[in-house]
Amino acid sequence: MARITRRQALTGAAAPLLVKSRTAFGSQASSAVSFGIIGTGGRGRFVGRLMTQDPRARLAAICDIRPERIDAAQTEIPGADKVKSYRDMKDLLARADIDAVLIATPVYLHPEHFEIAAAAGKHIYIEKPAGVDVAGVKRLLRAAERLGPSKTVGFGFQQRFSPEYLAAEKMIRSGQLGEMTLMISYWIWGGSAFTPAPGPNVRPTDEMERIRQWGRWKDTCGDFIVEQDCHGVDILNWFALAHPEKAYGDGGRYRRTAGDNSDHVNVSYIYPGGLRGWLLGTQLPPRAYWDVKEQFFGTQGVIEVARSYYSWQEAGKNKATRVDSKREITVDAVEAFFKSIADKKPFSMVKDAADSTLTSILGRMAVELRREVSWDEMMRGG
């Protein structure tokens, strides 16, 4: 199984727009990629809906341990009410007629669920991140090694398939930015720091309650820098073509009342050659305010990129050139996943996804320990 290259990603992202008619793909439904959904929470239902619109794909089953989530999926995902539903993912994975799975379960379960799906020999699209700690990421990496070269592994780092991100990345590779001197990721996401716990703020004592509350606690979500801000550090790693060698930072918990997560971080990553990458992440602004983007500064200009646009400002010029996105970028990731399976040209995002998850964990450690932490020290701890 080959690691996905920038050229492969560019090719995948150039696939035709999704259409609802299966005839647009020019094949019978029986030849479509049969897929199941494991985890029908909000993200599973969102990505699952997009997958049912791909003419290369056919929904075959859904699975969730929570019956109310099954009911929601059968209401919101086209065709989900007509396929078999499961409470145990192993029963779904035992079906030989299912080619691929979407895994959108709580983050702390990603390594285990990936391992089970890999053992079943399925193509896998799994939501980010790769785990909540180093041990979990290593477990996922070991499972991926056993998967074999014929299977596609996609992760929910969908920016890597966005035409806008790919255009910005191409500008950097072509030298248009000049020498890159600084990278900044902004994850300013309002509202959740002020969300009160709907009851006593106590750590869950049984597995079902852990699943219900997974987003509140560091041992089940990894903290917001791992669960959410991993998107931004993934872009820093991608554009730098490396993971950082060390990190230091500041942050913690200022106003959050539920769970034990932080609500603000400021991390400086040091990449090979001395290149700096900064992550500014917070959930302290008021609800409905957000500012999510990345900036790349070079000797010849500045590139700014987000899910809805990218812009380029040449050194010495007063105005930037902006290009807006044409659609939700998760569509591009879904298209690339099913196209690679249908074309029998598998790719794997495992190494990149693991590195970006570990980069987020490195930043979390630096904030918690209040000192510089090296990549090697982090990896030894797992």
Image (cartoon, grey):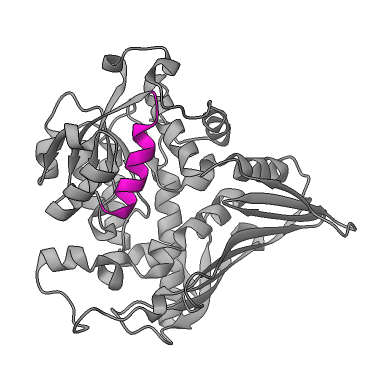
The majority secondary structure of the magenta stretch comes to: helix
Please name whichever residue, 349 or 32, is drawn nearer the observer in this view of the structure.
Answer: 32
Q: Is residue 62 left or right of residue 232?
A: left
Horizontal and vertical percent for residue 333? 46, 38
Say which residue appears at 27% left-offset and 57% top-offset: 136
Q: Is residue 165 left or right of residue 198?
A: right
Say which residue appears at 26% left-offset and 58% top-offset: 106
Say which residue appears at 21% left-offset and 39% top-offset: 117
Say which residue appears at 48% left-offset and 56% top-offset: 231
Please name whichever residue, 261 or 283, is drawn nearer the observer in this view of the structure.
Answer: 283
Q: Count the labels in the image.
A: 0
Q: Give yes or no for residue 44 being in the magenta stretch.
A: yes
Q: Is residue 279 left or right of residue 226?
A: right
Q: Is residue 333 visible?
A: yes
- Does residue 147 lie above or below 252 as drawn? above
Residue range (magenta): 41-55
Q: Is residue 269 left or right of residue 208?
A: right
Q: Give yes or no for residue 197 being in the magenta stretch.
A: no
Horizontal and vertical percent for residue 23? 40, 15
Horizontal and vertical percent for residue 320? 80, 54
Most distant residue in the bottom direction: 254
Instruction: Assign the N terminus to one quadrant of the image.
Output: top left
Please name whichever residue, 116 or 201, is drawn nearer the observer in this view of the structure.
Answer: 201
Horizontal and vertical percent for residue 255? 41, 86
- Does residue 60 lie above or below 304 as drawn? above
User: Quadrant of the rendered structure where residue 343 is?
Assistant: top left
Q: Is residue 38 visible?
A: no
Please name whichever residue, 223 or 68, is drawn nearer the observer in this view of the structure.
Answer: 68
